[in-house]
Amino acid sequence: MIKDDCIFCKLANGQIPCNFVYENSDVVAFDDLNPQAPIHTLVIPKQHYETLEDVNDKELLAKLMLAVKEVAKIKGAKNGFRTVINTKKEAGQEVFHLHIHVLAGRPMKWPPG
Ligand code: AMP
Ligand code: ZN
């Protein structure tokens, strides 16, 4: 399903022009508008799922993770990368279309804030 008022649905399905870092039949990746690291790309399903809690499709979850690895390779994150999925408000989710952050290009701190 694609949600009419969802910005990531519009980006993923061509209603808003966007340079994809990576695309396959189910997944797209594009750079974050407000990058938190030299490399900051979002990997999302083309279909609308509000949060990780809403996805039970194992194949889709695997495709998302494989796309993360592709993105890290394409972006040249050779010293490592961090993957983040914020799920619901308390975790910091602001856009309610599932997305995986891929961050790289600087040392990362732990624990995250
Ligand atoms: P989260 O807080 O995990 O929901 O992350 C949402 C992310 O989406 C933030 O890092 C935003 O900078 C990013 N974002 C919001 N709108 C856009 C957009 N139109 N294009 C690219 N990234 C966006
Ligand atoms: Zn959506």
Image (cartoon, rainbow, N blue to C red):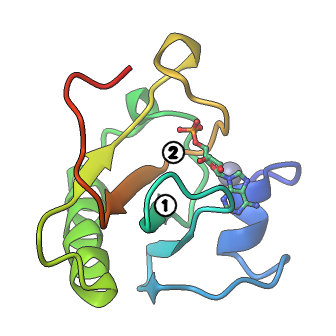
Residue shown at the point (41%, 52%) measured from the top left: 101
Disc 1 residue type (three-letter):
Ile
Indicate the position of residue 83 as horizontal and vertical percent values: 28, 49
Q: Which residue is mark 1?
A: 44
Q: Secondary structure at mark 2?
A: loop
Q: 37 or 4: nearer the eye?
A: 37
Q: Position of residue 17 (x, y in %)?
A: 80, 85
- Quadrant in which residue 59 is drawn: bottom left
The residue that appears at 22% across and 52% down in the rendered structure is: 107
C-alpha span from label 2 to label 1: 6 Å
Q: Position of residue 98 (x, y in %)?
A: 51, 45
Q: Is mark 2 within 8 Å of ligand 2?
A: no
Mark 2 — residue?
A: 98
Q: Quadrant of residue 25?
A: bottom left
Q: Quadrant of the N terminus?
A: bottom right
Q: Secondary structure at mark 1?
A: strand
- Side (left or right) of 34 relative to 74: right
Residue 83 visible to the viewer: yes
Within-10-Å neighbours for mark 2: few <14, some 14–19, many 20+: many
Instruction: In the rendered view, tell whether residue 67 sits above or below residue 51.
Output: below
* Residues at circles 2 and 1 in contact by the CB criterion of under 8 Å: yes
Beta carbon of the mark 1 residue lies under 8 A of ligand 2: yes
Instruction: Say whether residue 81 is left or right of residue 46.
Output: left
**Label 1: how many Cα within 10 Å (few below 14, some 14–19, many 20+):** many
Q: List the single residue furthest toward the top.
A: 90
Residue at image coords 30%, 67%: 105
